[in-house]
């Protein structure tokens, strides 16, 4: 898992070629144990991050009919990324779409744009409740590169 994340950060195109087929298979998996559902949740975000249009039908199915909300909700947000609706994610985050803030913050983190950073900063500073401010703060910290040895 760490090696995949490292590859994604170092060479996104290679990571996409190497791992997109795996993530697509995970989206189609019919297994329902917790480990498989955790893999499914990760796959949802990766295909969104890769802007994979081919995965949209499966994401829609998950968003509409998966039995668990922690799969349905991220799938519904993830759909917006390959559809080119990133601005909608940021607008909803800024407007404090409370029940969706966590998922919107994850998507903004994956977008890694100046506008996404600004939306997360705004949410972290001004969301009307502590839970949402904290969620955006945590995601914002994950976006920023770690500095080693004071560099």
Image (cartoon, rainbow, N blue to C red):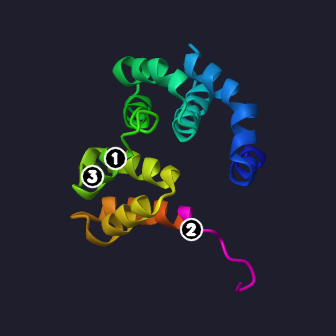
Task: Tell which circle, 3 or 2, labels the residue nearer the N-terminal end.
Answer: 3
Q: Quadrant of residue 125?
A: bottom left
Residue 143: where, in percent of width, then height?
Answer: 54, 62
Of residue 100 and residue 16, the one placed in the foreground of this image is 16
Residue in the image at 70% along x and 41% along y: 13
Residue 60's place in the image compared with 90, above or below, is: above
First to last magenta residue range: 142-151
Q: Is residue 101 left or right of residue 58?
A: left
The Cα atoms of the two marked residues, 3 and 2, are separated by 21 Å
Q: Does label 1 or label 2 sit earlier along the sequence?
A: 1
Based on the picture, tell me whether residue 41 belongs to the magenta stretch. no
Give the main secondary structure of the magenta stretch: loop
Residue 70 visible in rendering: yes
Measured along the vertical axis of the image, is residue 1 above or below residue 62?
below
Residue at the disc numbered 1: 89
Q: Position of residue 120 (x, y in %)?
A: 38, 62
Disc 2 designates what residue? 144
Instruction: Find out whether residue 146 is within the magenta segment.
Output: yes
């Amino acid at each position: 898992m760490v090696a995949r994340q490292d590859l994604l950060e170092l060479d996104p195109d290679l990571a996409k070629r190497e791992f997109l087929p795996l993530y697509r298979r995970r989206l189609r998996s019919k297994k329902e144990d917790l480990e498989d559902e955790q893999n499914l949740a990760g796959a949802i975000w990766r295909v969104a991050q890769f802007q994979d249009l081919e995965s949209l039908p499966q994401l829609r199915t998950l968003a509409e009919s998966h039995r668990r909300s922690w799969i349905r909700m991220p799938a519904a947000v993830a759909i917006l990324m390959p559809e080119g609706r990133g601005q909608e994610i940021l607008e909803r985050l800024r407007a404090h779409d409370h029940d969706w803030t966590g998922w919107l913050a994850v998507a903004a983190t994956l977008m890694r744009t100046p506008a996404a950073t600004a939306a997360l900063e705004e949410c972290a500073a001004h969301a009307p409740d502590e839970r949402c401010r904290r969620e955006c703060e945590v995601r914002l910290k994950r976006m920023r590169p770690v500095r080693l040895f004071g560099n």
